[in-house]
Image: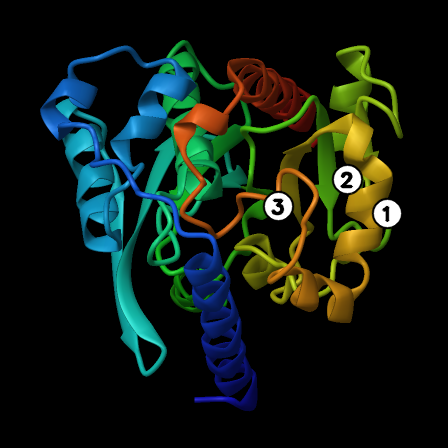
Amino acid sequence: MSLRDVGFYLRARVVGRLLRAANRRRPVAVAAPAPLEAVLAGHDAPLALTRLLEGRDNAGREAAVVRWLEARGVPFTRHAFATFEGRGETFAVDVGTGDRVLVLAAHHDAVPGSPGANDNAASVAVLLHLLGRLARGVPAGLRVRLLFPACEELGYLGARAWVRDHPPSDVVGVLSLELCGVGDALAVWDAEGTTPFLGRVCSALAGLDLRPDDDYHVVGRIPVFGSDHRAFAAAGVPAYGLTVVPRAEAAALRAFVFNPIRSTLNTLIRRPPPFDTYHTSRDSSATLSPAALAAVVTALEAIIVETAAHP
């Protein structure tokens, strides 16, 4: 146990109490989750796949990912962990046979009391949908690892445990997907400096005719908020968050996320989209945009091609 681990543990508990207080102030009835068998037999579009996890408790979300992968005969690696901070199981699917690994991560857990649609069932759905598209083949020389960590809401505990037990010496870059279902512009965040991988991400987005500071934004390290990529960044791997935001809210979002004190206090007051439903009982699939989810799939496909093309 390190002081860093203790810090993660304490922060998760403090933030959890603030969020529970916020949910008590504005309670919304949470709908029952969709029958699992119906989702497994249904369409594989990202919005439809969001129902795989939406509204389930974390044990149910974890089990649902396993059921989906097993039902489709997808080989995957299981990584169970248990520490004083919590326990869970992370899943990894490798596609391709290259020596260079691109990690695309989407955590499967949610905060208690939230249906967890945008955070983070939508991102899991994006990767599951992408998996079907990758079956056509991954460019030579590259392996794409779809990683589904547990316990991201506990200071990205699952990703930290994964990196501890799987040193990322072959990983050339990491993107963790968070809040990918609301908005019309992409945001690559925790980009504190230039790296070859960040350059490839930006080149891929530019190749889609996306305009910087309009269709997509690259921003520095965000205080308070974090995600699974930070476990890899701590190990020296170029790693960033990927989120969808409403472009009309760009200025309000910058003010919100770059002021840690205000961000914490606004947990109990007003938050700009997509944070208005973040960690609340209002985070349902009814708030999600199919176009936002499709934009992430398109961006990831372009990033895979660009990463493979530049060893």
Q: Residue 110: x percent and y percent?
A: 38, 52
The first of marks 1 and 3 along the sequence is 1
Could you tell me which quadrant the N terminus lies in? bottom left
Residue under numbered circle 1: 194
**Numbered-mark total:** 3
Q: Are marks 2 and 1 in contact (CB under 8 Å)?
A: yes
Q: Kindly identify the amino acid type of the residue bearing the numbered disc 2.
A: Leu
Task: Give the residue pinned by disc 2.
Answer: 198
Query: Residue 28's image quarter?
Result: top left
Q: Position of residue 93 (x, y in %)?
A: 34, 36
Question: Would residue 241 be seen by someone viewing this image from the given angle?
Answer: yes
Side of 226 relative to 114 (left or right): right
Front label number (1 vs 3): 3
User: Which residue is at the front of the view, 111 or 190?
Assistant: 111
Disc 2: CA contacts within 10 A as few (<14), some (14-19) or many (>=20): many
Could you say whether the residue bearing mark 1 is in a helix, strand or loop? loop
Q: Residue at x 50, y 25 (%)?
A: 288
Relative vertical location of residue 145 with respect to residue 215 in this rendering, above or below: below
Q: Residue at x 79, y 13 (%)?
A: 207
| Kind of element beneath mark 3 | loop
**Distance CA(mark 2)–CA(mark 3):** 25 Å
What's the amino acid at mark 1? Thr
Q: Quadrant of residue 205?
A: top right
Q: Position of residue 217 (x, y in %)?
A: 81, 34
Relative to residue 66, is residue 208 drawn left or right? right
Q: Is residue 159 visible?
A: no
Q: From the viewer's perspective, is residue 80 above or below residue 69?
A: below
Please give the name of the residue rendered at 84% of the width and 52% of the height, measured from the top-left corner.
Answer: 255
Instruction: Tell me the number on the disc at residue 275.
Output: 3
